[in-house]
Image: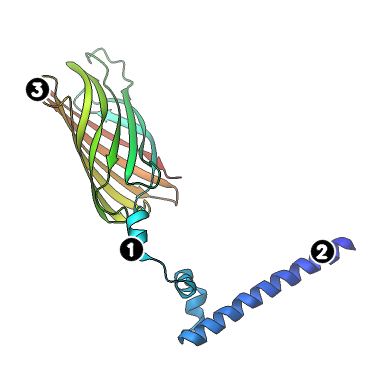
């Protein structure tokens, strides 16, 4: 008996809330001379009717891209197409600033005797985005450290460069990041690295991502192709 009374009260509360929401929609539609169905199906319009958002503030402080945790398969065409894996994170925002942190690790897993040495790369960078974070185009200087091992040479040192972000759809739905950096610039072991990363969301939090990279040094040139998934919290 008590359970039935509680159930009836819950149903009554639910019906009352729905009726109040419907009445609010009718009142707003009459006030702004809009079809009630438009208001019912558009949370954006309802939000704007309650309070007009500060668009300029959103553009400056709300990023059009999100933090991305990465994991997948990588291949080294310049090393007999040896395969391996990669993992990392891109653009962890450091507080309410345009400063972000990124780190990555890739390792060849092939044991082929034809390959002189394993390919390995590990590094971490910080990026400072110069344009408002909500922009669909952004650019950031890059500063960090990177260590590289490959068939023929190994080097490590300061990594400096620049990153270009092209955001086709906000909040991680689709974008391209192009990074050009130099490890140990001006030194005898300098290595130029070009990376192109393309990501496309398949769910709200999961993306399919591909990356193509080239390493150019005095001793030799290397390439790397990766495909995997990115998780956006």
Rendered image quadrant of residue 74: top left
Q: CA distance from mark 2 to mark 1?
A: 48 Å
Q: How many marks?
A: 3
Indicate left or right for 28 with 182 as reference.
Answer: right
Upstream in sequence: badge 2 or badge 3: 2
Crowding at mark 3 (Cα within 10 Å: few <14, some 14-19, many 20+): few
Upstream in sequence: badge 3 or badge 1: 1
The x and y percentages for residue 40 are: 52, 75
| Secondary structure of the residue carrying numbered label 3 | loop
| Secondary structure of the residue carrying numbered label 1 | helix
**Which label lies toward us, 3 or 1?**
1
Indicate left or right for 139 with 217 as reference.
Answer: right
The x and y percentages for residue 183 are: 19, 27
**Residue marked by disc 1:** 56
Rendered image quadrant of residue 219: top left
Upstream in sequence: badge 2 or badge 1: 2
**Residue marked by disc 2:** 6
User: What's the residue at 85%, 66% (across, down)?
Assistant: 5
Residue 143's disc is none
Colouring of the image: rainbow
**Residue marked by disc 3:** 218
Q: Is residue 142 visible?
A: yes
Crowding at mark 2 (Cα within 10 Å: few <14, some 14-19, many 20+): few
């Amino acid at each position: 008996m008590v359970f039935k009374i509680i159930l009836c009260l819950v149903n009554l509360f639910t019906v009352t809330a729905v009726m109040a929401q419907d009445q609010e929609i009718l009142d707003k539609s009459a006030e702004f001379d809009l079809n009630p169905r438009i208001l019912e199906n558009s949370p954006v319009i309802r939000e704007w009717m309650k309070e007009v958002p500060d668009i300029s503030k959103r553009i400056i402080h709300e990023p059009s891209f999100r933090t991305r945790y990465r994991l997948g398969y990588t291949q080294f065409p310049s090393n007999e197409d040896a395969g391996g894996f990669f993992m990392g994170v891109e653009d962890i925002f450091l507080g309410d600033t345009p400063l972000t942190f990124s780190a990555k690790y890739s390792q060849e897993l092939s044991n082929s005797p034809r390959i002189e040495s394993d390919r390995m790369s590990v590094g971490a960078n910080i990026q400072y985005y110069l344009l408002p974070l909500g922009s669909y185009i952004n650019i950031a200087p890059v500063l960090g450290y990177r260590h590289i091992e490959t068939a023929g040479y190994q080097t490590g040192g300061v990594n400096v460069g620049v990153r270009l972000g092209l955001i086709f759809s906000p909040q991680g739905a689709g974008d391209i990041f192009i990074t050009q950096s130099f490890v140990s610039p001006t030194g005898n072991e300098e290595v130029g690295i070009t990376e192109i990363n393309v990501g496309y969301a398949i769910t709200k939090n999961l993306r399919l991502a591909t990356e193509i990279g080239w390493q150019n040094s005095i001793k030799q040139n290397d390439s790397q192709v990766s495909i995997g998934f990115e998780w956006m919290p």
